[in-house]
Image: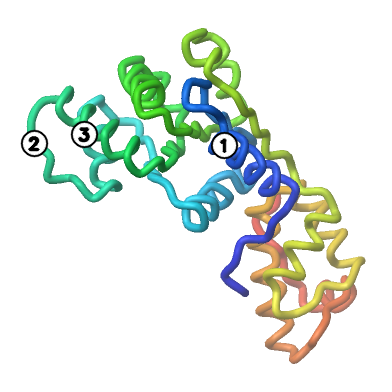
Amino acid sequence: MKNLVVETKNVRRLLTAHSALKEAAHYLPKIGLVHGLAGAGKTTGIAHLNQTEGGCFVRATAVWTPRTMLQAILRELGRDDVSGNNQTKLDEIIRLLAISNLPLFVDEADYLFTRAATLDILRDIHDQAGVPLFLIGMERISRKVNARELVASRVAQEIKFTPLDLEDTRLVADGLSEVRLEDDLLKDLHKKAHGSVRRITVGLSVIETFGKQMRLSSITLADWKSGGHAYFLER
């Protein structure tokens, strides 16, 4: 399997939203809300954006407090040596982001809604640093955001990661697999994966391994069924 990110429709929407937020005037709100079902490719898309365009990427956890969140952001900014109270750490984060003009990406942002203070601090960072803030979460996060007007009113871009269609599945298969999937096999994989990019990728890995073992340059559905394999643990 090739190690690259395929620019599906979801990824292209993300890149377009990033450009819009990056180019927005300093005084305009710049929160991007990225959401979708598990396995939709949100984290992979954000990681690709972070690597190619630059940014500060952190992953929220269930035990995040304001202090651990601030420390995590400082660590990603290369300044985990900053001592002092939370205000000192917050001021340094704002200063560093404002100077670098880097966006802040917060994955697993659903956890922020269990501790209101963490979300309020991120809003402070967004307002004072003037850089884009991306909140990445599950499909239901948009409802949680809408319930908090101070955050909802700052969302300038909403990017929903939807299940891959057959066209995008072909892009992913051709981009990642070193063994070609014929159309009938591709359609079967897409159907059983329900458009989940994670499941499609897992399936491609298994198919590619089978194809290489059988020394096939391309695989049909009949070839695949003859091996008696499964793409993944089906739902």
Label 3 packing within 10 angstroms: few (<14), some (14-19), many (20+):
some
The amino acid at mark 1 is Glu
Q: Secondary structure at mark 2?
A: loop
Name the outermost residue toward the left. 84
How far is disc 2 from disc 3 in space, using C-alphas?
A: 10 Å
User: Which residue is at the front of the view, 208 or 74?
Assistant: 74
Task: Give the image location of residue 80, x and y in percent.
Answer: 17, 45
2 or 3: tag closer to the N-terminus: 2
- Could you tell which of marks 1 and 2 lies nearer the N-terminus? 1
Q: Which mark is residue 4?
A: none
Q: How many marks?
A: 3
Tag 2 residue: 83
Secondary structure, mark 1, is helix
* Residue corresponding to mark 3: 92
> What residue sits right under mark 1 in the picture?
23
The amino acid sitting under disc 3 is Glu
Give SS at disc 3.
helix
> Which label sits in the foreground, 2 or 3?
3
**Is residue 136 depicted above or below 46 in this figure?**
above
Residue displayed at 59% across by 66% down: 4
Residue at left 17%, top 25%?
Answer: 86
Q: Report, in whole angstroms, how far the alpha carbon at label 1 lies from the one at label 2.
A: 33 Å
Q: CA distance from mark 1 to mark 3?
A: 24 Å
Which residue shows up at 66% across the image and 59% down it? 232
Q: Amino acid under label 2?
A: Ser
Tell us which disc is closer to us: 1 or 2.
Answer: 1
Task: Please identify the quarter of the rendering in which residue 57 is found.
Answer: top left
Residue at coordinates 21% horizontally, 28% vertically from top-left?
A: 91
